[in-house]
Amino acid sequence: MSITIEKATCADAAEILRYLKQIGAETDNLTFGAEGLPFTTESEAAYIRQMENSCDAIMLLAKENGKIVGDASLSRLPRRMKHRGDLGVSVLKEYWNRGIGSQLLLEIINFAKENAFEVIDLQVRSDNLPAIHLYEKFGFKKIGMHPVFFKIGDEEIAFDYMCLKLQ
């Protein structure tokens, strides 16, 4: 398995949207399901274009032979929260436990350090122990919990808030 980690480009937009639908169908760990996110290829490309030379946001893709198998994004928060960034990570189910999440996190943390982020925030399902273990491996600490972060049908899903202090 040869996985590459690269910055998303506008040319990746349509494939990213397909990836999001696939990953949304595979897991209930995300805030969306098989419907994916309500973006067009054009709006996704525009979003990626805004990040091209940004010090405030990045989207990384893990690819195997050109196929997206994972992604991670970090976006700086505004105003008095600009020292913080919000992190999102996902990996296709068939690629879990292969170190791809670690590769993506390492690159995101490096970007954050290079661009003067002080804290990285994330939210993770409280019962997603493999993801929590991954984040803890990189130094993230649990700072709180939301008992009904989202609902799937009538099921209330709790999430942990975690952060990594970089400085």
Image: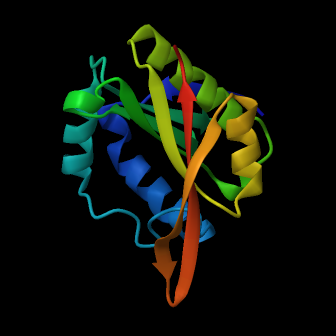
Image position, residue 133 (x, y; %): 76, 44
Instruction: Determine the residue positioned at 28% across, 22% down.
Output: 52
Relative depth, front residue between 145 and 16: 145
Image position, residue 122 (x, y; %): 51, 44
Q: In the image, 156: left or right of 141?
A: left
Image position, residue 20 (x, y; %): 46, 57
Relative depth, front residue between 17 and 72: 72
Instruction: Determine the residue positioned at 62% across, 67% down.
Output: 26
Q: In the image, 84: left or right of 22?
A: left
Quarter holding the N terminus?
top right
- Is residue 123 visible in the rendered image? The answer is yes
- Is residue 4 visible in the rendered image? The answer is no
Image position, residue 23 (x, y; %): 55, 60
Instruction: Determine the residue positioned at 29% across, 31% down.
Output: 81
Image-quadrant location for residue 54: top left
Q: How many labels does the image show?
A: 0
Relative depth, front residue between 13 and 59: 59
What is the image's colouring? rainbow
Residue sitting farthest toward the front: 144
> On screen, 96 above or below 127?
above
> On screen, 56 above or below 134?
above
